[in-house]
Image: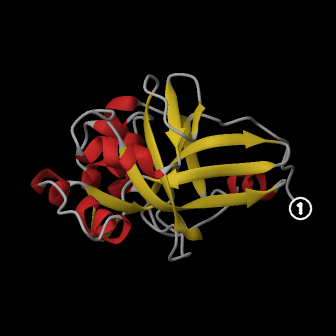
Amino acid sequence: MKDASPSILKHHFLIAMPHMDDPNFAHTVIYLIDHNDQGAMGLVINRPNGLNLADVLEQLRPDSQPAVLCQSLPIFSGGPVQTDRGFVLHPKGPHFQATVDLGELSLSTSQDVLFAIAEGHGPANHLIALGYAGWGAGQLEAELADNAWLSCPADQAILFETPYDQRLGAAAALLGIDLNLLTAQAGHA
């Protein structure tokens, strides 16, 4: 087995290599929320799941009509783990019932953040996801050693300002790479 020595990649992007064949992660870019010797957790940031905030709010408050703006706020497939659990990634600032500070960013998991966004007093920049991507101890390191992912420090402009369908290419461009020029064939020298 290749050396899978730990390298802390918290607050980094994971960029799927073109040969990634796992349908959960092919053509994705992931924001790593946490990475330590116990494993890693992240959110896929470029794969909307077809729902919008209005759809979610209709389930949470069936007797209330969501604001029209909620129809234009996509929900992302954050990953294949706990797909019924919601996560809101946003810049540090407002705290909600369940908010974890991540440094420059925060992660909120309580419904009140969704209601605040819908009512126009939540975080202006946010990414709402159902589910997350998770790796056990050493698993991500092994995938990196197998050239399944590229990694680079995360950029908030890509997270919050770049259209979702351009995030993969924009993240790769941070490394000076055009993924369209890479082969889908994997190999090792």
Residue at (51% x, 33% y) in the render: 106
The outermost residue toward the left is 68
Residue 126: x %, y % from top left:
35, 40
Residue 101 versus residue 82 in the image, above or below:
above
Residue 8 versus residue 187 in the image, above or below:
above
Residue at (53% x, 49% y) in the render: 109
Residue 89: x %, y % from top left:
45, 41
What is the number of callouts on the image? 1
Residue 166: x %, y % from top left:
26, 50
- Give whichever of 112, 77 is nearer the camera: 112
Residue 50: x %, y % from top left:
28, 72
- Give whichever of 140, 78 is nearer the camera: 78
Q: Quadrant of the C terminus?
A: bottom right
Q: Which type of secondary structure does the marked residue at label 1 adopt?
A: loop
- The type of residue carrying mark 1 is Met
Circle 1 crowding by C-alpha within 10 Å: few under 14, some 14–19, many from 20: few
Question: Label 1 belongs to which residue?
Answer: 1
Residue 66 versus residue 91 in the image, above or below:
below
Side (left or right) of 107 relative to 138: left
Side (left or right) of 187 relative to 75: right
Scheme by which the image is coloured: secondary structure
- Give whichever of 184, 154 is nearer the camera: 154
Residue at (89% x, 62% y) in the render: 1
